[in-house]
Amino acid sequence: MLDIRPATARDHDAIWSIFREVVGAGDTYTFDPAMPREEALAYWLQPSHRCFVATHGESVVGTYVLKANQPGQGAHIANAAFMVAPAARGRGAGRAMGEHALETARAAGFRAMQFNFVVSTNAPAVRLWQQLGFRIVGTLPGAFRHPVDGYVDAYVMFRPLVD
């Protein structure tokens, strides 16, 4: 049974473990793959982010953050970032966190959600976001330096949360 809840201080080690594995692969996030723990957690857990974890039993299998995409006049659009532990992929944690983020953003009064940088070669993420109603509204040619595929595109994806 998967549960999604706000992250607490006791989740920091698990969040760091997931962050290190996902970012260390260098194929989905622009963060430095060698980013140290303190810097990674300072980013992921900054006060402007609402951080959640997905748990299966006692194990944290994923994490996401939800925030305003921009300050001020753009603060009505949500932004989120998601990470699933590599060993837990393909079991629905990403979809469950995505659905949870959409519900949480809507309840918080956001009018839409935007992802600013989805790496085009991350086919599972692109497919999931499209299944959850996101559209590719922009392509950033060669914006990401993939460790295997070289310079690949990144997408801006968008989904309204109100009718």
Image: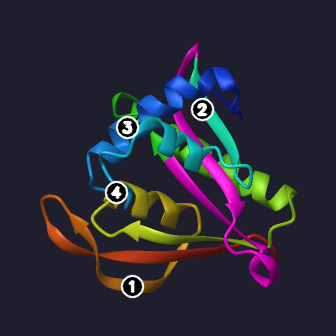
Measuring from the top left, give residue 129's x and y in whole percent: 51, 62
User: The residue under label 4 is which amino acid type?
Assistant: Thr
Under circle 4, the secondary element is: loop
Give whichever of discs 2 and 4 has the lower sequence position. Answer: 4
Residue of label 1: 139
Measuring from the top left, give residue 98's x and y in whole percent: 60, 51
Give whichever of discs 2 and 1 has the lower sequence position. Answer: 2
Above or below: residue 78 compared with residue 26: below
Mark 2 and mark 4: span between their CA atoms?
19 Å
Are dots 4 and 3 in contact, CB under 8 Å? no
Q: Residue at x 34, y 34 (%)?
A: 86
Residue of label 2: 54
Q: Residues within 10 Å of mark 1 (few under 14, many from 20)?
A: some
Mark 4 and mark 3: span between their CA atoms?
12 Å
Give whichever of discs 2 and 3 has the lower sequence position. Answer: 3
Q: Residues within 10 Å of mark 4 (few under 14, many from 20)?
A: many
User: The residue under label 2 is which amino acid type?
Assistant: Ala
Classify residue 112 by image quadrant. bottom right
Mark 1 and mark 4: span between their CA atoms?
16 Å
Above or below: residue 25 compared with residue 149: above
Are dots 2 and 3 in contact, CB under 8 Å? no
Question: Which is in the foreground here, disc 2 or disc 3?
Answer: 3
Under circle 3, the secondary element is: helix
Residue of label 4: 28
Q: Residue at x 50, y 38 (%)?
A: 38
Question: Which is in the foreground here, disc 3 or disc 1?
Answer: 3
User: The residue under label 1 is which amino acid type?
Assistant: Thr
Give the residues drawn in magenta, as a range: 57-82
Measuring from the top left, give residue 34's x and y in whole percent: 30, 45
User: The residue under label 3 is which amino acid type?
Assistant: Arg
Under circle 1, the secondary element is: strand
Please tell me the numbered disc located at residue 107: none
